[in-house]
Image (spheres, helix red, strand yellow):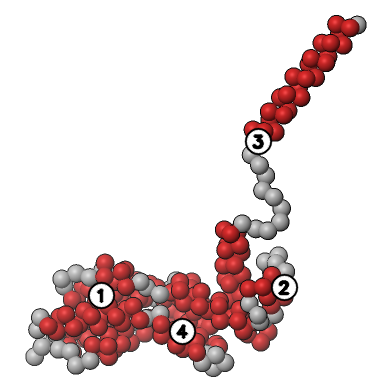
Amino acid sequence: MKKEAAKKEAVKKVVVKKETAKKRAAPARPRAGRPTREEAARRHEELLDSAIDWFLESGYDNTRVIDIADSLGMSKRTVYAYYKDKEALFIAAVDRLVERYIVPIETLQAAETDDLEETLRAVARIRIANVATPAGIKLQRILNAQSHRFPDLINRSLSTIEPTLAFLSGLFRRLEAQGKVRVTDAEAMATAFLSLVVSGPSRMIIMGGRMEQADIEARINFSVDLFLNGIRPR
C-alpha cells in the first residue's frame, strides 16, 4: 500500500511539473483594459471612416454621434474624448479624406519624361485615377453637400491640388527657360491645364457616371493637344 501511495504521489508531482512548465512556456495573454497604441490608432481611423459614411448617407443634420459610436461598438464618451462635438468630428473626417486624396509631388516627378506631351498625359491619368478612388469620390461629394455650411472646406479641397500645381508650374518654368513653351503665368497655366484635362471626367465620375478607359484616353489626348497648341512658341 505504501509503495502504491508513493507511486501515485510521484505521478502527481510529474503532472504538476508539466502543467507548471506549460504555463511558463505559454505566451502571455493580453490584459483586458486599455488598448495598445496600435489598436487605438486603428479604432480612431475606423471612427473617421465611419463618420464620413454616416455624413454622406444621412446628411450632417440627421447624423448623430451616438449612431456613429453604436455602429462601431464604441461608447459616445470615447468619441467625445477625441472630439468635442459633431462639427469637430466632421472636420477631422474630411481632413482625413484630404490626406488620402493628395497626390504626392514625388509621384508626379516619377512620371516626368523628356517628352512634355507624354508627361502631361501621365499627370492627367494620375489625377483622373485619383478622383475615381473611394477617398476622391467621397471627398468631392461631401464638399458638394456641405461646403455651404462649412465654407472653409473649399480651402481644404484646394490644398489637395497644391502638389500638382507646384509640379506643373515648375515644369513650365524650366521649359520656358529652354525656349520650348511660352509662359506668362506658370501657376495660371497649371490651373488651366487641370481644368481643361481633368475637370470633365472628374465630374462624370463623381456623379456616378461610367467612363470607359478608351473614352478617358481620348479625352486626355484631345485636351493635352489643345493645351500644347496654346503654349508652344510661335
Question: With respect to residue 100, does 165 lie above or below?
Answer: below
Q: Which residue is mark 4?
A: 156
Query: Which residue is disc 2 drawn over?
Result: 76
Q: Quadrant of residue 173?
A: bottom left
SS at circle 3: loop
Q: Given contact means CB atoms under 8 Å apart, are the residues at marks 1 and 4 in contact?
A: no
Q: Position of residue 79 (x, y in %)?
A: 67, 73
- Residue 19, compared with residue 51, is above or below; it is above
Q: Where is residue 17, by image quadrant?
A: top right
Front residue of 12/184: it is: 12
Asked whether residue 141 appears in the rendered view, the answer is yes
**Mark 1, residues whose alpha carbon is within 10 Å: few (<14), some, or many (≥20)?**
many
Disc 4 or disc 3, which is closer to the eye? Answer: 3
Going by the numbered disc 1, the residue's amino acid type is Arg
Label 2 vs label 4: CA separation? 27 Å
Query: Quick one: label 3 or label 1, which is nearer the N terminus?
Result: 3
In the image, taking residue 222 as reference, residue 156 lies left or right, namely: right
